[in-house]
Amino acid sequence: IRELIHELRKDEQIKRIELFAEADNEIGLNFYKKVGFQVEGCLKRYMKRAQDDHFVDELVLAMIFD
């Protein structure tokens, strides 16, 4: 993913990368933050997994290129 981000930064038309991650996905969130993504917002009770009886929040993350 670092190589992909490096390549995307070369394109001056690309100003940001966005992604969505489940709020309880600690491993994924830690990885995204480690490579430079920041949490921009939260979609409360956004989804429900088939095997669960509760809804899960979804976080919106982004990396902004200057």
Image (cartoon, rainbow, N blue to C red):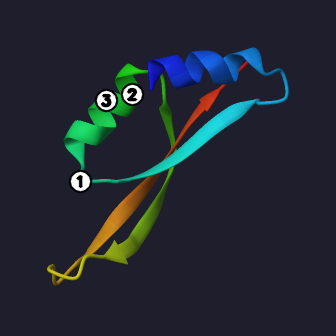
What's the distance in space between the residues labelled 1 and 2, CA to CA? 14 Å
**Which of the two marks, 2 or 3, is nearer to us in this view?**
3
- Mark on residue 33? 2
Quadrant including the C terminus: top right
| Residue at the image position 73 percent from the left and 15 percent from the top | 10
Percent of width and height locating residue 62: 57, 37
Circle on res. 32: none
Residue at the location (62% across, 36% down)?
17
| Label 1 secondary element | loop
On the picture, is 20 further left or further right than 28?
Answer: right
- In the picture, measured across the screen, residue 25 lies left or right of residue 17, that is left
Q: Which mark is residue 31?
A: 3
Q: Amino acid at mark 3?
A: Phe
Q: Quadrant of the N terminus?
A: top left
CA gap, disc 2 and disc 3: 5 Å
Residue 24, disc: 1
If you read the primary sequence from the N terminus, does the residue marked by circle 1 or circle 2 appear first? 1
Tally of numbered tags:
3
* Mark 1 Cα shell of 10 Å, populated few (<14), some (14-19), many (≥20): few
Measuring from the top left, give residue 25's x and y in whole percent: 24, 49
- What is the three-letter code of the residue carrying label 1? Asp
Q: CA distance from mark 3 to mark 1?
A: 13 Å
- 13 lies left or right of 60: right
| Of pointers 3 and 1, the one earlier in the residue sequence | 1
Q: Is residue 23 left or right of residue 20?
A: left
